[in-house]
Image (cartoon, rainbow, N blue to C red):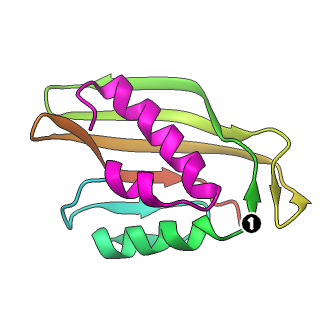
Amino acid sequence: MTTSLQDAINAFLAAGNQNLRGDPSAIQAIWSETDDISDMGPTGTFNRGRKAVMDQFATESVMGFDGTVVMVDRTVVETADMGFLVCREQAPGATLNGQPIALDMRSTTIFRRENGHWRVVHHHTDRLI
């Protein structure tokens, strides 16, 4: 678990890349376990609730992505119990099912402090596919 917002942001990026390489276990660990979470990811779906969000990440983990996402142009805002990250997610040289893709999306991630640890409660990106 992460006790600083910056650690949570780093964990989110690492977990997202791990998920895209086929392993959703880290992404499951950093998201809130409450049912008020939501995700509007690159596939265009709007997922609400823990089960729907985790099911979507499981779907994305087997989509055939090859590459590493990086976050650029970061803006971070933190209060005592909430924080958010606005950035661009890019993956130079990435492929999807062997075909080159241009991944450069705007992204917003919202974090909430729960029991002393920062957890993701919402993520939103531009639509990619």
Residue 8 at what x, y percent from top left? 35, 33
Nearer to us in this view, 72 or 10: 10
Residue 47 in sight from this viewpoint = no
> How many numbered dots are placed on residues in this image?
1
Residue appearing at x 49%, y 46% in the figure? 15
Q: Is the stretch drawn in magenta largely helix, strand or loop? A: helix
- Please tell me whether residue 126 is drawn above or below residue 1 in the rendered image: below
Residue 71 falls inside the magenta stretch: no
Task: Give the residues drawn in magenta, as a range.
Answer: 1-30
Secondary structure state at the residue bearing disc 1:
loop
Residue 97 at what x, y percent from top left? 83, 67
Residue appearing at x 28%, y 61% in the figure? 37
Residue appearing at x 47%, y 62% in the figure? 40
What's under tag 1, amino acid-wise? Gly
Residue 12 falls in which quadrant of the image?
A: top left
- Please tell me whether residue 53 is drawn above or below residue 93 in the rendered image: below
